[in-house]
Image (cartoon, grey):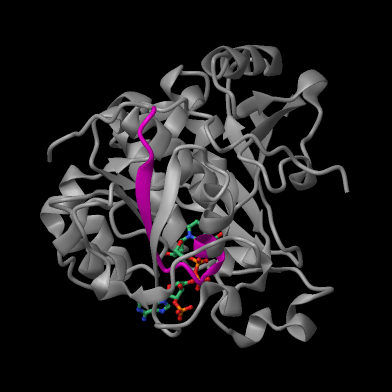
Amino acid sequence: MMSRTVAPAKTLNAAILGATGYTGGEMIRLLARHPHVHIHSLSSHSFVGESVHSVLPNLTGLELPTLQAHESIQGEDIDVIFACLPHQQSHTLLAPLAERHRIIDLSADFRLSLSRYQQWYQTEHSAPELLHAAVYGLTELYRDSIRSASLIANPGCYPTAVLLPLLPLLQGGLIESDDIVVDAKSALSGAGRTLKPHLLFCEAQQDITAYGIDGHRHSAEIDEQICRHDPQAPEVLFTPHLVPMNRGILATLYVKTQASPQEVVSHLKATFADDAFVHVTDEHRMPHTSWVAHSNHALIGVSPRIVNNRLVLVCVIDNLVKGAVGQAIQNMNVMVGFDETCGLDSIAPRL
Ligand SMILES: NC(=O)c1ccc[n+]([C@@H]2O[C@H](COP(=O)([O-])OP(=O)(O)OC[C@H]3O[C@@H](n4cnc5c(N)ncnc54)[C@H](OP(=O)(O)O)[C@@H]3O)[C@@H](O)[C@H]2O)c1
Protein backbone atom coordinates (compact mmCIF):
# COMPACT_ATOMS: atom_id res chain seq x y z
CA MET A 1 0.00 0.00 0.00
CA MET A 2 1.15 3.51 -0.73
CA SER A 3 2.18 5.84 2.06
CA ARG A 4 1.23 9.51 1.87
CA THR A 5 2.88 12.49 3.49
CA VAL A 6 1.04 15.63 4.52
CA ALA A 7 2.65 18.86 5.66
CA PRO A 8 1.90 19.43 9.36
CA ALA A 9 0.16 22.73 8.75
CA LYS A 10 -2.57 21.16 6.61
CA THR A 11 -5.96 20.54 8.20
CA LEU A 12 -7.03 16.95 7.74
CA ASN A 13 -10.61 15.97 6.99
CA ALA A 14 -11.55 13.05 9.24
CA ALA A 15 -14.48 10.66 8.93
CA ILE A 16 -15.60 8.57 11.91
CA LEU A 17 -17.42 5.33 11.19
CA GLY A 18 -19.45 4.22 14.20
CA ALA A 19 -19.57 7.71 15.68
CA THR A 20 -22.38 6.89 18.12
CA GLY A 21 -20.57 4.23 20.18
CA TYR A 22 -18.35 4.72 23.22
CA THR A 23 -15.16 4.97 21.15
CA GLY A 24 -16.85 6.96 18.36
CA GLY A 25 -18.18 9.54 20.83
CA GLU A 26 -14.80 9.78 22.53
CA MET A 27 -13.17 10.20 19.11
CA ILE A 28 -15.41 13.19 18.35
CA ARG A 29 -14.68 14.70 21.77
CA LEU A 30 -10.90 14.46 21.32
CA LEU A 31 -10.72 15.30 17.59
CA ALA A 32 -12.83 18.42 18.16
CA ARG A 33 -9.85 19.79 20.13
CA HIS A 34 -7.20 18.69 17.62
CA PRO A 35 -5.75 21.83 16.01
CA HIS A 36 -5.20 20.21 12.60
CA VAL A 37 -8.33 18.07 12.19
CA HIS A 38 -11.76 18.92 10.83
CA ILE A 39 -14.55 16.41 11.50
CA HIS A 40 -15.82 15.90 7.96
CA SER A 41 -18.35 13.10 8.32
CA LEU A 42 -19.89 10.78 10.89
CA SER A 43 -21.67 7.48 10.42
CA SER A 44 -24.06 5.33 12.40
CA HIS A 45 -25.91 2.04 12.07
CA SER A 46 -29.15 2.90 13.91
CA PHE A 47 -29.39 6.71 13.78
CA VAL A 48 -28.91 7.60 10.11
CA GLY A 49 -30.21 11.11 9.34
CA GLU A 50 -30.23 12.15 12.99
CA SER A 51 -28.12 14.73 14.73
CA VAL A 52 -25.25 13.22 16.70
CA HIS A 53 -26.21 15.51 19.59
CA SER A 54 -29.50 13.68 19.97
CA VAL A 55 -27.59 10.44 20.59
CA LEU A 56 -24.62 11.94 22.47
CA PRO A 57 -25.86 15.08 24.27
CA ASN A 58 -22.45 15.56 25.94
CA LEU A 59 -21.28 16.89 22.55
CA THR A 60 -23.70 19.84 22.73
CA GLY A 61 -21.95 23.00 21.59
CA LEU A 62 -19.86 21.33 18.89
CA GLU A 63 -20.82 21.95 15.28
CA LEU A 64 -20.97 18.48 13.76
CA PRO A 65 -22.21 16.82 10.55
CA THR A 66 -25.43 14.80 10.51
CA LEU A 67 -25.11 11.04 10.94
CA GLN A 68 -25.07 9.15 7.66
CA ALA A 69 -24.97 5.47 6.72
CA HIS A 70 -21.56 3.78 6.96
CA GLU A 71 -21.75 2.85 3.26
CA SER A 72 -22.22 6.48 2.19
CA ILE A 73 -18.95 7.67 3.73
CA GLN A 74 -16.70 8.49 0.81
CA GLY A 75 -15.12 11.40 -1.00
CA GLU A 76 -11.75 12.47 -2.32
CA ASP A 77 -11.61 15.16 0.34
CA ILE A 78 -11.51 12.69 3.26
CA ASP A 79 -7.91 12.34 4.46
CA VAL A 80 -8.32 9.85 7.29
CA ILE A 81 -10.99 7.41 8.40
CA PHE A 82 -11.33 6.27 11.99
CA ALA A 83 -13.37 3.07 12.15
CA CYS A 84 -15.03 2.58 15.55
CA LEU A 85 -17.11 -0.40 14.48
CA PRO A 86 -17.73 -3.86 15.89
CA HIS A 87 -15.28 -6.49 14.69
CA GLN A 88 -16.43 -8.32 11.57
CA GLN A 89 -18.28 -5.20 10.41
CA SER A 90 -15.01 -3.34 9.98
CA HIS A 91 -13.28 -5.55 7.43
CA THR A 92 -16.35 -5.62 5.21
CA LEU A 93 -17.03 -1.88 5.33
CA LEU A 94 -13.39 -0.80 5.08
CA ALA A 95 -12.33 -2.99 2.15
CA PRO A 96 -13.72 -0.62 -0.54
CA LEU A 97 -12.28 2.45 1.22
CA ALA A 98 -8.73 1.27 1.80
CA GLU A 99 -7.45 1.97 -1.70
CA ARG A 100 -8.04 5.72 -1.43
CA HIS A 101 -7.93 6.61 2.26
CA ARG A 102 -5.70 6.35 5.29
CA ILE A 103 -7.54 4.18 7.80
CA ILE A 104 -7.16 3.60 11.50
CA ASP A 105 -9.33 0.69 12.57
CA LEU A 106 -10.17 0.27 16.25
CA SER A 107 -11.67 -3.19 15.87
CA ALA A 108 -9.81 -6.49 15.98
CA ASP A 109 -10.26 -7.12 12.24
CA PHE A 110 -6.71 -6.30 11.16
CA ARG A 111 -4.72 -7.21 14.28
CA LEU A 112 -4.10 -10.92 13.78
CA SER A 113 -2.61 -13.23 11.20
CA LEU A 114 -5.24 -14.70 8.86
CA SER A 115 -5.06 -18.15 10.46
CA ARG A 116 -5.33 -16.79 13.99
CA TYR A 117 -8.20 -14.50 12.92
CA GLN A 118 -10.15 -17.37 11.39
CA GLN A 119 -9.49 -19.56 14.42
CA TRP A 120 -10.61 -16.96 16.97
CA TYR A 121 -13.42 -15.22 15.10
CA GLN A 122 -14.72 -18.33 13.33
CA THR A 123 -15.31 -16.49 10.08
CA GLU A 124 -13.67 -15.77 6.76
CA HIS A 125 -11.87 -12.44 6.39
CA SER A 126 -13.21 -10.40 3.46
CA ALA A 127 -9.93 -8.51 2.88
CA PRO A 128 -6.95 -10.78 3.69
CA GLU A 129 -4.61 -8.67 1.54
CA LEU A 130 -5.40 -5.65 3.73
CA LEU A 131 -4.85 -7.70 6.84
CA HIS A 132 -1.32 -8.50 5.61
CA ALA A 133 -0.66 -4.83 4.84
CA ALA A 134 -1.96 -3.49 8.15
CA VAL A 135 0.52 -2.22 10.73
CA TYR A 136 -0.13 -2.96 14.41
CA GLY A 137 -0.50 0.44 16.04
CA LEU A 138 1.21 0.10 19.40
CA THR A 139 2.73 3.49 18.82
CA GLU A 140 5.74 3.52 21.13
CA LEU A 141 6.98 0.14 19.90
CA TYR A 142 6.14 0.24 16.17
CA ARG A 143 6.51 3.95 15.39
CA ASP A 144 8.78 3.46 12.37
CA SER A 145 6.34 1.13 10.60
CA ILE A 146 3.39 3.37 11.49
CA ARG A 147 5.05 6.34 9.75
CA SER A 148 4.74 4.69 6.35
CA ALA A 149 1.46 2.82 6.88
CA SER A 150 -1.90 3.44 5.21
CA LEU A 151 -3.89 1.04 7.40
CA ILE A 152 -3.39 0.83 11.14
CA ALA A 153 -4.77 -1.98 13.28
CA ASN A 154 -5.20 -0.04 16.49
CA PRO A 155 -4.47 -2.36 19.42
CA GLY A 156 -7.09 -3.64 21.82
CA CYS A 157 -7.35 -2.07 25.26
CA TYR A 158 -6.18 -5.09 27.26
CA PRO A 159 -3.29 -5.84 24.84
CA THR A 160 -2.10 -2.22 25.07
CA ALA A 161 -1.85 -2.43 28.86
CA VAL A 162 -0.17 -5.84 28.72
CA LEU A 163 2.23 -5.37 25.80
CA LEU A 164 3.64 -1.96 26.76
CA PRO A 165 5.59 -3.42 29.71
CA LEU A 166 5.91 -6.96 28.34
CA LEU A 167 7.43 -6.54 24.87
CA PRO A 168 10.43 -4.37 25.87
CA LEU A 169 11.31 -6.80 28.65
CA LEU A 170 11.08 -9.79 26.29
CA GLN A 171 13.09 -7.98 23.62
CA GLY A 172 15.72 -7.03 26.23
CA GLY A 173 15.96 -10.64 27.44
CA LEU A 174 15.02 -9.62 30.98
CA ILE A 175 12.08 -11.99 31.32
CA GLU A 176 11.24 -15.45 30.05
CA SER A 177 8.64 -15.88 27.33
CA ASP A 178 7.19 -19.04 28.82
CA ASP A 179 4.88 -19.07 31.79
CA ILE A 180 3.59 -15.49 31.59
CA VAL A 181 0.46 -14.94 33.68
CA VAL A 182 -1.75 -11.87 33.25
CA ASP A 183 -4.66 -10.92 35.43
CA ALA A 184 -6.46 -7.85 34.08
CA LYS A 185 -9.42 -5.71 35.08
CA SER A 186 -11.54 -3.58 32.80
CA ALA A 187 -14.17 -0.93 33.35
CA LEU A 188 -17.59 -1.58 31.84
CA SER A 189 -17.16 0.88 28.95
CA GLY A 190 -14.70 -1.65 27.52
CA ALA A 191 -17.71 -3.71 26.46
CA GLY A 192 -19.23 -0.93 24.33
CA ARG A 193 -22.57 0.85 24.45
CA THR A 194 -24.77 -1.90 23.09
CA LEU A 195 -27.28 -3.09 25.67
CA LYS A 196 -26.26 -6.33 27.37
CA PRO A 197 -28.09 -7.67 30.45
CA HIS A 198 -24.94 -8.37 32.48
CA LEU A 199 -23.89 -4.72 32.07
CA LEU A 200 -27.10 -3.29 33.56
CA PHE A 201 -26.49 -1.17 36.69
CA CYS A 202 -28.22 -3.65 39.02
CA GLU A 203 -26.19 -6.55 37.66
CA ALA A 204 -22.78 -4.90 37.45
CA GLN A 205 -22.52 -2.51 40.39
CA GLN A 206 -21.12 -4.01 43.63
CA ASP A 207 -19.84 -6.94 41.61
CA ILE A 208 -16.58 -8.20 40.11
CA THR A 209 -16.23 -11.28 38.00
CA ALA A 210 -13.72 -13.07 35.82
CA TYR A 211 -14.88 -13.83 32.29
CA GLY A 212 -13.59 -15.33 29.08
CA ILE A 213 -11.70 -17.94 31.10
CA ASP A 214 -12.07 -20.50 28.32
CA GLY A 215 -10.09 -18.13 26.07
CA HIS A 216 -10.54 -14.41 25.53
CA ARG A 217 -9.97 -12.98 22.03
CA HIS A 218 -7.46 -10.48 23.40
CA SER A 219 -5.19 -13.31 24.52
CA ALA A 220 -4.82 -14.18 20.82
CA GLU A 221 -3.68 -10.62 20.15
CA ILE A 222 -1.17 -10.73 23.01
CA ASP A 223 0.14 -14.10 21.81
CA GLU A 224 0.42 -12.81 18.24
CA GLN A 225 2.74 -10.03 19.37
CA ILE A 226 4.81 -12.23 21.68
CA CYS A 227 5.27 -14.75 18.85
CA ARG A 228 6.86 -12.02 16.75
CA HIS A 229 9.60 -12.02 19.36
CA ASP A 230 9.63 -15.76 20.06
CA PRO A 231 7.66 -17.94 17.62
CA GLN A 232 7.94 -20.88 20.03
CA ALA A 233 6.50 -18.99 23.01
CA PRO A 234 3.58 -20.79 24.67
CA GLU A 235 0.24 -19.06 25.22
CA VAL A 236 0.00 -16.39 27.88
CA LEU A 237 -2.41 -17.30 30.67
CA PHE A 238 -4.71 -14.27 30.51
CA THR A 239 -7.75 -13.78 32.74
CA PRO A 240 -9.86 -10.64 32.31
CA HIS A 241 -12.26 -9.30 34.94
CA LEU A 242 -15.09 -6.78 34.74
CA VAL A 243 -15.12 -4.16 37.49
CA PRO A 244 -17.90 -1.64 38.18
CA MET A 245 -16.12 1.48 36.90
CA ASN A 246 -16.78 3.64 33.84
CA ARG A 247 -13.20 3.81 32.56
CA GLY A 248 -9.87 2.16 33.11
CA ILE A 249 -7.82 -0.98 32.67
CA LEU A 250 -5.42 -2.39 35.21
CA ALA A 251 -3.24 -5.29 34.06
CA THR A 252 -1.17 -7.25 36.58
CA LEU A 253 1.62 -9.28 34.98
CA TYR A 254 3.43 -12.16 36.72
CA VAL A 255 6.67 -12.84 34.86
CA LYS A 256 9.69 -15.06 35.45
CA THR A 257 13.00 -13.24 35.60
CA GLN A 258 16.61 -13.61 36.67
CA ALA A 259 16.93 -9.80 36.75
CA SER A 260 16.44 -7.61 39.81
CA PRO A 261 13.45 -5.24 40.07
CA GLN A 262 15.91 -2.34 39.75
CA GLU A 263 17.22 -3.72 36.44
CA VAL A 264 13.66 -4.10 35.16
CA VAL A 265 12.80 -0.53 36.17
CA SER A 266 15.97 0.79 34.52
CA HIS A 267 15.25 -1.09 31.29
CA LEU A 268 11.67 0.17 31.08
CA LYS A 269 12.69 3.73 31.91
CA ALA A 270 15.37 3.63 29.20
CA THR A 271 12.89 2.16 26.67
CA PHE A 272 10.33 4.91 27.22
CA ALA A 273 12.74 7.76 28.03
CA ASP A 274 11.74 9.77 24.93
CA ASP A 275 8.02 8.94 25.05
CA ALA A 276 5.47 11.47 26.20
CA PHE A 277 2.80 8.99 27.23
CA VAL A 278 4.43 5.96 28.88
CA HIS A 279 5.98 6.32 32.33
CA VAL A 280 7.41 4.06 35.00
CA THR A 281 6.32 5.03 38.51
CA ASP A 282 9.01 5.93 41.02
CA GLU A 283 10.00 3.86 44.04
CA HIS A 284 7.96 0.84 43.01
CA ARG A 285 4.71 2.75 43.56
CA MET A 286 1.75 0.86 42.13
CA PRO A 287 -0.27 3.03 39.70
CA HIS A 288 -4.03 3.66 39.98
CA THR A 289 -6.46 3.74 37.06
CA SER A 290 -7.66 7.17 38.23
CA TRP A 291 -4.16 8.57 37.60
CA VAL A 292 -4.63 8.10 33.84
CA ALA A 293 -8.39 8.58 33.43
CA HIS A 294 -9.33 10.69 30.36
CA SER A 295 -5.65 10.87 29.37
CA ASN A 296 -3.47 9.09 26.82
CA HIS A 297 -0.92 8.12 29.46
CA ALA A 298 0.11 4.63 30.53
CA LEU A 299 1.74 4.10 33.92
CA ILE A 300 3.82 1.05 34.76
CA GLY A 301 4.66 -0.01 38.32
CA VAL A 302 7.25 -2.67 39.21
CA SER A 303 7.06 -4.60 42.48
CA PRO A 304 10.17 -4.31 44.70
CA ARG A 305 10.33 -8.02 45.46
CA ILE A 306 10.73 -11.26 43.59
CA VAL A 307 9.10 -14.48 44.83
CA ASN A 308 10.12 -17.83 43.27
CA ASN A 309 11.79 -15.94 40.40
CA ARG A 310 8.52 -14.14 39.70
CA LEU A 311 8.20 -10.41 39.42
CA VAL A 312 4.91 -8.48 39.44
CA LEU A 313 4.30 -5.52 37.12
CA VAL A 314 1.17 -3.39 36.92
CA CYS A 315 0.14 -1.23 33.97
CA VAL A 316 -2.84 1.15 33.94
CA ILE A 317 -4.46 2.96 31.03
CA ASP A 318 -7.80 4.55 30.19
CA ASN A 319 -9.40 1.93 27.94
CA LEU A 320 -11.13 4.57 25.82
CA VAL A 321 -8.07 6.79 25.39
CA LYS A 322 -4.66 5.03 25.35
CA GLY A 323 -6.60 1.77 24.91
CA ALA A 324 -8.51 3.08 21.88
CA VAL A 325 -9.11 6.63 20.64
CA GLY A 326 -6.07 8.42 22.08
CA GLN A 327 -3.70 5.85 20.64
CA ALA A 328 -5.57 6.06 17.31
CA ILE A 329 -5.03 9.84 17.20
CA GLN A 330 -1.41 9.35 18.27
CA ASN A 331 -1.02 6.96 15.32
CA MET A 332 -2.60 9.46 12.94
CA ASN A 333 -0.18 12.12 14.18
CA VAL A 334 2.75 9.79 13.48
CA MET A 335 1.39 8.76 10.05
CA VAL A 336 1.04 12.30 8.77
CA GLY A 337 4.02 13.87 10.50
CA PHE A 338 2.22 15.94 13.14
CA ASP A 339 3.69 16.27 16.60
CA GLU A 340 2.82 12.91 18.20
CA THR A 341 1.14 14.56 21.19
CA CYS A 342 -1.03 16.91 19.11
CA GLY A 343 -4.61 17.01 20.46
CA LEU A 344 -3.70 14.67 23.31
CA ASP A 345 -2.68 17.06 26.05
CA SER A 346 -5.36 16.02 28.55
CA ILE A 347 -4.18 14.78 31.94
CA ALA A 348 -6.25 12.94 34.53
CA PRO A 349 -8.52 15.15 36.65
CA ARG A 350 -7.79 14.97 40.40
CA LEU A 351 -11.41 14.05 41.25
N1 LIG B 1 -14.89 0.28 24.32
C1 LIG B 1 -13.57 0.18 24.43
O1 LIG B 1 -12.97 0.44 25.50
C2 LIG B 1 -12.75 -0.24 23.25
C3 LIG B 1 -11.34 -0.19 23.35
C4 LIG B 1 -10.55 -0.58 22.26
C5 LIG B 1 -11.17 -1.03 21.10
N2 LIG B 1 -12.53 -1.11 21.03
C6 LIG B 1 -13.13 -1.59 19.79
O2 LIG B 1 -13.68 -0.47 19.12
C7 LIG B 1 -14.84 -0.87 18.36
C8 LIG B 1 -16.02 -0.01 18.81
O3 LIG B 1 -16.23 -0.24 20.21
P1 LIG B 1 -17.26 0.61 21.06
O4 LIG B 1 -16.98 0.27 22.48
O5 LIG B 1 -17.28 2.01 20.63
O6 LIG B 1 -18.63 -0.11 20.60
P2 LIG B 1 -20.14 0.44 20.75
O7 LIG B 1 -20.22 1.43 21.84
O8 LIG B 1 -20.99 -0.76 20.83
O9 LIG B 1 -20.39 1.19 19.35
C9 LIG B 1 -20.47 0.46 18.16
C10 LIG B 1 -20.67 1.38 16.96
O10 LIG B 1 -20.85 0.55 15.81
C11 LIG B 1 -22.16 0.69 15.28
N3 LIG B 1 -22.75 -0.64 15.04
C12 LIG B 1 -23.32 -1.48 15.95
N4 LIG B 1 -23.73 -2.60 15.35
C13 LIG B 1 -23.45 -2.48 14.04
C14 LIG B 1 -23.64 -3.30 12.90
N5 LIG B 1 -24.22 -4.50 12.99
N6 LIG B 1 -23.21 -2.86 11.70
C15 LIG B 1 -22.62 -1.66 11.58
N7 LIG B 1 -22.42 -0.83 12.63
C16 LIG B 1 -22.82 -1.23 13.84
C17 LIG B 1 -22.97 1.43 16.33
O11 LIG B 1 -23.92 2.24 15.64
P3 LIG B 1 -25.36 2.66 16.27
O12 LIG B 1 -25.05 3.23 17.62
O13 LIG B 1 -25.83 3.65 15.31
O14 LIG B 1 -26.16 1.41 16.35
C18 LIG B 1 -21.91 2.25 17.06
O15 LIG B 1 -21.67 3.46 16.38
C19 LIG B 1 -15.04 -2.36 18.66
O16 LIG B 1 -14.49 -3.12 17.64
C20 LIG B 1 -14.28 -2.57 19.97
O17 LIG B 1 -13.81 -3.89 20.13
C21 LIG B 1 -13.33 -0.71 22.07
| Picture quarter with the N terminus | top left
* Residue 158 relative to residue 346: left or right: left
Residue 260 in picture, x, y percent from top left: 67, 15
Q: Measuring 30% from the left and 37% from the top, which residue is drawn there?
A: 232
Q: Measuring 46% from the left and 17% from the top, which residue is drawn there?
A: 172
Q: Is residue 247 visible?
A: yes
| Residue 29 magenta-highlighted | no
Q: Measuring 57% from the left and 30% from the top, which residue is drawn there?
A: 256
Residue 154 in picture, x, y percent from top left: 40, 48
In the figure, residue 173 lies in which quadrant? Answer: top left
Relative depth, front residue between 154 and 63:
63
State the extent of the magenta-drawn residues as a range. 9-24
Q: Measuring 63% from the left and 51% from the top, which residue is drawn there?
A: 183
* Residue 236 relative to residue 187: left or right: left
Relative depth, front residue between 344 and 236:
344
Relative depth, front residue between 65 and 6:
65
Residue 64 in picture, x, y percent from top left: 50, 64
* Residue 103 relative to residue 211: left or right: left
Residue 316 in picture, x, y percent from top left: 67, 42
Q: How many marks?
A: 0
Vertical position of residue 10 compared to residue 154: above or below: above
Residue sticking out furthest to the right: 351
In the figure, residue 227 lies in which quadrant? Answer: top left
Vertical position of residue 277 compared to residue 314: above or below: above
Vertical position of residue 308 compared to residue 61: above or below: above
| Residue 23 magenta-highlighted | yes
* Residue 58 relative to residue 119: left or right: right
Q: Is residue 309 visible?
A: no
